[in-house]
Image (tube, rainbow, N blue to C red):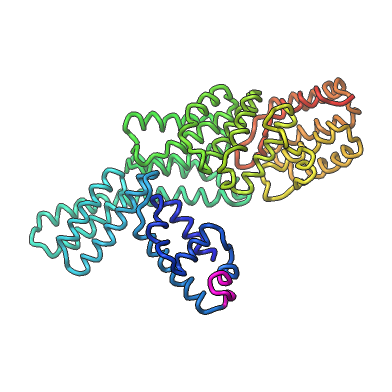
Amino acid sequence: MQEIQQILKVIVTSSSKGYLSNYLLKGKSLESNFIGGIIHNEFNSDGEAALKLYGTDQSDVRYKMLKYRVKKKLYNSLLTIEINNNDLAFQKEVECTRLLNIARILLRQAEHQLAIGLCSKVISIAKEYEFNEHLLSAYEIEIAALTNQTSLKVFTEKRKQYLEKLIVVNLEKEANGLHQLAKAHLRGTVKVRKTLVKELPAIINRLKQIVTEANTFETFLSLYVTSILYYELIGNFSEIIKITEDAVNNLNKGKTNAARFDIKYNAYILIYAHLRTKEYAKGLVFANDFYNLFKPTTRNWFAYMENYFLLAVHAKQYELASVLLHRVRSNTSYGIIKNNAKERWQLFTAYLFFIAPSSPVLEGFNYQKFITSVTEYSKDKQGFNVAILILQFMYYLKKGDTEGLLYKIESLKKYILTHLKDTFSLRSKLFLKLLMLTVTEDYDAQSCRVKGAKYYQKLIETPTPGDAYAEIEIVPYEHLWELILETMPK
């Protein structure tokens, strides 16, 4: 069942609107009922499907054969579906793949002229979109076909083109391989990431050499994404701004393939980098300018809104943050985002409740229920564990719950000793010490301000670390400390 659900998801996401209804759901056959039932969530397991369709369980041989037929039909449909126009480059890439497959069949059947004719179409598309690997394959088929033709001159010219393109494609493959190597290491442990940081400068230098040699979109893309990955790891977001702005300039000058370049990803990274460099005003201008690039019905829109919301909060524009949160919470496509993304929005809502509780968007939000139900520490919430601890502490502080605060102090001490031992955790460690000070100084705001001055000053002087290691500051710690001092119960 899961495999069929995944294929259907790919077809629905990739194909032209209505493809399934036009080609797979005709009539009232068991196959169409089976597919329709999955799409409309009438059943989510083999047991439910077998019972609905045959009045039996999933071990029924008739149900097993039905699944086999449907699975085969769906896989075959992936070879023939019309890709939607939202991703024109992908549409053209799929078209090249199909034409090359047909050309190989024709070549096998000795229909050389027909094969060459299809390769000509592939060559035209591949040159426009810089699909050099497809271009190389087309040259390869042409050469095989021309081997059986009489014109040695044409054969020699095509072979020369093939050999030139072979060098380029090999460079592209090397560049792509270097990027994949870096990306794979990024998913490892913190220790693995630290090793990667040391190796990345050499990888980037090699990528720059490859770009100089090949000068293709694929080699540029490998350098572009790997460079962003590296500077994100070391926390140099100013360099990321430069990379994204240079990319747009080159795009406007026609130096980058406009059909292939992902302007939405570039906008997303540019906004995020401004958040991390604390250029909030400039970042908000960009965030507003690029807003219409993203469709509200997509996950990318929700991801973009996270950075937009955080920019507003960090800029202390809480009214704007409330408006953005309302857009997210009222979006009818909210259900499409993953659970961890929903949890982040819940966390953002809770922080906004603390700093701007009178905002209309917070009506109906059960702050107490959220605080008491959220897990204190889990790998699922990696990047937000400190944010959760802080929120829980502020909840008890706002209530004036001395007993609860004494308990939380022990939790904070334990967390610091266990999880905040590295230098990249210094900001979080300093802020948690400031929080503990509120209890030891008996909730006296003036005393906390004086006794906490050294921690606060060091907090200001400590930059945020690279994204590879950092806990997310939903509200800057400096802003939170001022808010806590202002609202501290007497």
Residue stretch in magenta? 50-59
Residue at the outermost front position: 28
Q: Quadrant of residue 149?
A: bottom left
Taking the spot 46% from the left edge, 45% from the top edge, the residue there is 203
- Total labels: the figure holds 0
Identify the residue at the far bottom of this view.
61
Along the line of sight, the residue nearer the viewer: 49 or 458: 49
The one nearer the camera, 102 or 301, is: 301
Q: Is residue 487 magenta?
A: no
- Say left or right for 275 vs 145: right
Is-magenta flag for residue 57? yes
In which quadrant of the rendered image does the N terminus lie? bottom right
Residue 209 seen from this side: no
Between 89 and 414, the one lying in front of the other is 89
Q: Nearer the viewer, residue 119 or 208?
A: 119
Q: Quadrant of residue 392?
A: top right
User: Which residue reaches farthest left?
Assistant: 150
Give the percent coordinates (x, y) of residue 394: 80, 33
Residue 353, image x and y in percent? 73, 32
Q: Quadrant of the C terminus?
A: top right
> For this view, does 382 lie left or right of residue 234?
right
Name the residue at 78% across, 35% down.
Answer: 432
- Residue 165 is left or right of residue 44, and the answer is left
Q: Residue at x 70, y 38 (%)?
A: 425
- Residue at (48%, 37%) from the top-left corner? 294
Percent x, y for residue 147?
A: 15, 63
Q: Is residue 446 above or below residue 405?
A: above
Measuring from the top left, give residue 475's x and y in whole percent: 69, 30
Residue 170 in sight: yes
